[in-house]
Amino acid sequence: MPKRELTRPYEPNAALRKFYARFFESIQVDEAWVREVRRLAAQGSVIYVLRNLNFIDFLALDHLTKHHGLPQIRFVNDLGLWILNPMGKGWLNAILPPRGVTPADELEDAIEHGGSAALFLKRPPGVLDLATGASGGRGLKEGDELMRTLIDLQRSRKKPILLVPQVFVWTKAPDTRGTHPLDVLLGPREWPSPMRTVGQFLYNYKHVALKVGEPFNLAEFLHTSNGASDAVRVRQVTYAMLRRLERERRSVTGPAEKPPDRVRLEIVRSPRLRAVVEELAGERPADRHLITAKALNILRELQAAPDAGTIKGLEMLFHRVFHRIYAGIEYDKADIERIREAGKRGALVLLPSHKSHIDYLILSYVFNEENLKLPLIAAGDNLNFFPVGAILRRGGAFFIQRSFKGDRLYTAVLDAYLRRILRDGYPVELFLEGGRSRTGKLLPPKFGLLRMLVEAALTSNSAPVFFVPVSIGYERIVEAQSYERELIGGEKSKENAKGFLKSTDVLRHRYGRINLQVGQILTVADTAKELDVDPETKLSPSQARAVVTRLGNRVMDEINRVTAVAPGSLTALALLTHERRGLPHEELVERARKLLSVMQKLDVRVTPTVQTSSGGLRPEAIREAVQMFIDAQLIEAHFPDESEARRGEGEQAGEGAIYTIVENKRLALDTSKNIVVHFFVERGLVAIALLVPPGPPVPLHVVRDRVQKLSRLFKYEFRFRADAPFDEIFAQTVAALSSSQKVEVIGDSLECGPGADGWTGREWLETYASILKNFVEGYRVAARGLNALLKGPLTEKDLVKRSLTVGNRMFYAGEIERREAVSKPLIQNALNSFADQGYIAQRENKLELSESFRNPRAVRAIESRIRGFLEEVPE
């Protein structure tokens, strides 16, 4: 007689099925979860393990496993589901229930019949537990017996039993320290009652997610735990599963909340900060109290105070705003998963590029959408004005003084605060460039905050710290208009409430898409090993500085490497590097296609909207970008074949149009172009060096020497590769140009190649040189501006201002071609380069000509050297 089946998959009644299916289908289920459970089911028997007893969790899991065709649940412990469905185990078991059947028997039956089981490890605390303050989370006695049953079953079978942690994240709000009155009725956040779970689900339904933890192979565990008793094994397995479940949950909710005043008190009591306070105070207790109070005030001004209600409001607001002014945020799910996995293993330091105030919101917005714990963001105290400061602080920003050099107490307080939030497990976000780039190119890294974080990582005995380079790319910058004013010499506007209200004007415009790319995740240990430094030993000050410098530069190089080509940057690149007055639409598309093909051969990342599924350029992407620039009044569309009839009427970009750049808007367009300019620097320098009048053929060693001079000249302008010496990089660039037929090496000389893709070799070289032409012209302007120093020293600010005036005069006189060459950052970088080359020196906060160049002829010679890269200079 066949053995009676004790278990069957749970089948809800029709009313329940209709009710909860409607809600559970909105739960975010990662395809990776489906694939992983399916893969594990092919290896052995899957047991779904959940933390605290909650029938809502079971109903959701049961629905989702059925919906995705995963192993069916035939047994669940301690829920009493027969009340909801008395016939759930079959009519025979309902009418004549078998005697002496234990939950362990049912669990064994479920596995023997090829099914799965849901095993809850903990029972939530009861009302008396909460009221008396007793610790909750008592283990189920039955849970221990069931775990022992699984161990016994594993001994008698070859196929492994795989315990798979399942975590439903019903709320992203962190746990709280202590008990609130509401917790007595509804259960605390970490142990919610079904009623609270339903409330959390309805409040957070767009972001409810099912997470899968690291599976536990019972067969492998038994093989490696020889000698242990079953009681010990049960505890080991249970605790291992609880750790994995909690790690998944905390990856979304973050650390438990504490009142801000309690956190401040704990920070000022930290040994490192207390030592600084005592050293500054000396022997007098009154001074110690005074300095401690000052430290508390610094913390009060500094500290972030994340608030779930504010974050929810910001989520709703910015979801509307982002989709009103942007066409979306593009990012790779695989990048997010890399961040998620690193966050489970240790602390995260997020290091994004900084081109806009919108940067402060992007990572938080994406993390919120992807159910990652939100970062605490280092912001300048210039943003701490009413009402923005209070909102940002509640959204997770902490405010740092723009300058605190020499202030030991402030430095010590900031250091203690950073160490505390890293130790607590908060992701930290900071902008390594310090301020926003006005040009679209990366700024040099600032090492102050990074040094503190590296020191914290080196002295941490807990989890590792992961440094995450992030490229945030825009097709068009929201602040482009104010940047343009600053680039031509205007003063930076101070952030205030009036400017904030005026910024609502951006809602009337479209700014294309935002693109987010994540580089290689770095650690201090790996960086130290690159320098042959042992991170396990105490580093000397010079070694620590070297590690910080290498790490900072690696981060910036990674950001450049992973920056993606977007339609706006590609279109701006094509528009700004042709030499004619206007560019027909068809030629613009073809020009963009050619430039894109170069970057694709360099394995540059490309946004999905730029290219087709086969990898070719999507022409519609260029048309959309052009329309965006037309709407922003950066370019104009002309239709001479239609007597300009379409001008100003709706959509203007497309076939038949001829585009011209609005001359005084070239700087704004240049910001978009510069986002990808670094991909062409090496080729551009070789092209400039080869095309120096009278042009090719040119001895190869002469081209090399010219490129080296240009590299030194542009030391502060571009980030050059640091992974190889100059000669190797030069040889690789020439080889790449040669293999693509842009140049030919004939004997010891370099010549234009036959060309490729419809352009001659010379046309390709002229295009590459044109990409960098405004930089060469800008440095020529700076060289002409040095004439102002012939009359005596000037501050850098005054010299830059006079140089900009000279540059405008040169542009209108036709001495330079590019309006974007007259740019404040270009002049400033050029002056830094001139100081390196010994043309100028600084004394008492003023710049002056070096002794060898204090005459008009020497100054003219500086300009002539730079001008010689552009045109033939008369004797």
Image (cartoon, helix red, strand yellow):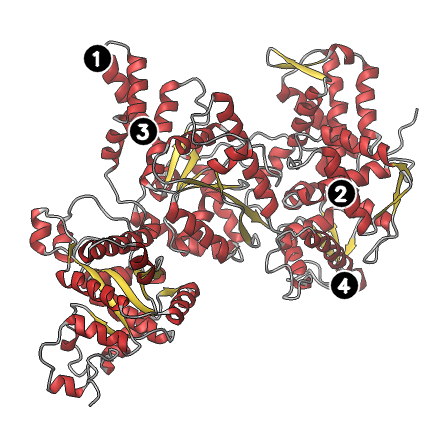
Answer with left or right where residue 274 lies relative to residue 129: right
Residue drawn 61% across and 35% down? 485
Q: Secondary structure at mark 1?
A: helix
Q: Of the residues under marks 1 and 4, which one precedes in the sequence?
A: 1
Measure how far apart labels 3 and 4 are at the Cα level. 61 Å
Q: Secondary structure at mark 4?
A: loop
Across and down, in percent, residue 555 comes to: 54, 39
Neighbor class of circle 1 (other Cα within 10 Å; few <14, some 14-19, many 20+) is few
- Residue 142 position in % (x across, y down): 14, 64
| Residue 145 point in image, percent of width and height | 16, 63
Secondary element at tag 3 = helix
Disc 2 designates what residue? 733
Give the vertical position of 534 relative to 516 (above or below). above
* Residue type indicated by callout 2: Thr
Q: Quadrant of the N terminus?
A: bottom left
Tag 3 and tag 4, C-beta contact below 8 Å: no
In the rendered view, tell whether residue 670 sits above or below residue 449. Answer: below
Residue on which the image places disc 1: 285
At label 3, the amino acid type is: Leu
Q: Quadrant of residue 65?
A: bottom left
Q: Amino acid at mark 4?
A: Gly
CB atoms of marks 2 and 3 within 8 Å: no
Q: Quadrant of the C terminus?
A: top right
810 sits left or right of 835 in the view: right
Q: CA distance from mark 4 to mark 2?
A: 38 Å
User: How much space separates mark 1 and mark 3, taking CA atoms?
Assistant: 21 Å
Question: Is residue 631 visible from the viewing direction of this image?
Answer: no
What amino acid is found at the position of numbered circle 1 in the picture?
Pro
